[in-house]
Image (cartoon, grey):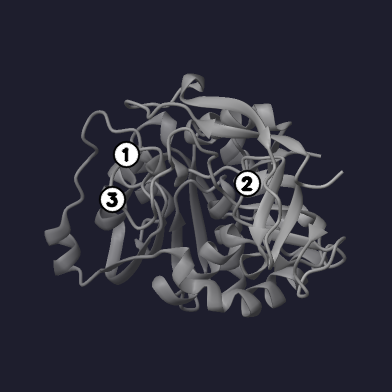
Amino acid sequence: MTSQTRSAREIQLAARPDGVPTAANFALVERPVPELAAGQILVRNTWMSVDPYMRGRMDDKESYIPPFELGAALEGAAVGEVIESRSAAIQVGARVSHFAGWREHAVVDAEYATPIDSGLAAEHHYLGALGTTGLTAYAALTDVAPIRPGDTVFISAAAGAVGSVAGQIARALGAGRVIGSAGGPVKTALLRAEFGFDAAIDYRAGDLAGQLVAAAPEGIDVYLDSVGGEHLKVAIEAMRRGGRIALVGAISGYNGGQAAAVPDLYLAATKEITLRGMLVSSYFPLFGEYIGKAAGWLAEGALRTRETVYEGLEQAPAAFLGVLAGANTGKMLVRLG
């Protein structure tokens, strides 16, 4: 069977959400797989990623990345096996990562696919600790808000994909104390027991500011922000002079609704705090350096990972809604085959 006669399922954007997305915003559709053009490959996707930033792409508004199109398959990171090729650079049987997830089979320009070494690490790690998730944590703590030896580091969404890796990287970079924020006693216990955080804050228990002061009575030096809102506000209040903040995400405001707590930027100025945003795409040239280090950390057990896995393409919308609600521990993944 060739790609010209093959059909496959994909998840399309059926309607744009108003506030919190629901299952009705997605549609599972079967459609023919296009015939390959010169320089293209056909990938049978085996794993796909769902990530909070995708919520912004569901809205029809200008941003750093184009919105998803109505009636078309969504996009996201995926890995899989090349089952057809019209490219001399990538042969049938190769394992690759690419950006055409949310479908069982993907036609990809070979120049936008990256061969992966499944002998170095399990292929799903290339969507998490060895993918843009891990690179985000590494770039945030080495360049955007660089850690200095002995620093006290605060990480929000610390039981999530980026945060759980970031806490361990912070330790590897010489942090003196690492504090994480997560939702609920199960996740906060995991931060200490498995990911090596020195202290864990349950933001759902209330008094986030008081809990952070108790965990870091002398203040914090670095904050990796994936949440925004109240977390950013209390981090600025707790930060020592000359502190650094990496603005990685703001999941607390992705669905709109009530206005979030407003950070005191005047206070940030008087403390000479640096607040710097980041897009992981700006750090793709750092991938080689990062994977070289992170693969070693994984092999040694110095970098531990957790995954929350949904089975089957039809479960991708539920996985995505789950990650927006904080249902995942570690990386949220969908296994396709």
Q: Is residue 148 above or below residue 258?
A: below
Q: Amino acid at mark 1?
A: Gly
Disc on the earlier residue, 1 or 2: 2
Q: Quadrant of residue 95?
A: bottom right
Q: Which residue is mark 3?
A: 62
Q: Which mark is residue 101?
A: 2
Check the picture and name the quadrant holding the C terminus.
top right
Foreground of the two, 286 or 11 = 11
**Which circle, 1 or 2, is nearer the viewer?**
2
x and y percentages locating residue 72 in the rendered image: 51, 38
Q: Amino acid at mark 2?
A: Gly
Q: Is residue 312 left or right of residue 27?
A: right
Q: Which residue is mark 1?
A: 253
Q: Is residue 64 visible?
A: yes
x and y percentages locating residue 83 in the rendered image: 83, 54
Q: Is residue 288 above or below residue 9?
A: below
Q: Is residue 189 left or right of residue 57?
A: right
Task: Report, in whole angstroms, how far the alpha carbon at label 3 lies from the one at label 1.
Answer: 17 Å
Q: Which residue appears at 40% of the width and 38% of the height? A: 58
Check the picture and name the quadrant holding the N terminus.
top right
Disc on the earlier residue, 3 or 1: 3
Q: Which mark is residue 212?
A: none
Per the image, label 3 sits on a secondary structure element best described as loop
Q: Amino acid at mark 3?
A: Glu
x and y percentages locating residue 25 in the rendered image: 46, 25
Task: Report, in whole angstroms, how far the alpha carbon at label 1 lies from the one at label 2.
Answer: 25 Å
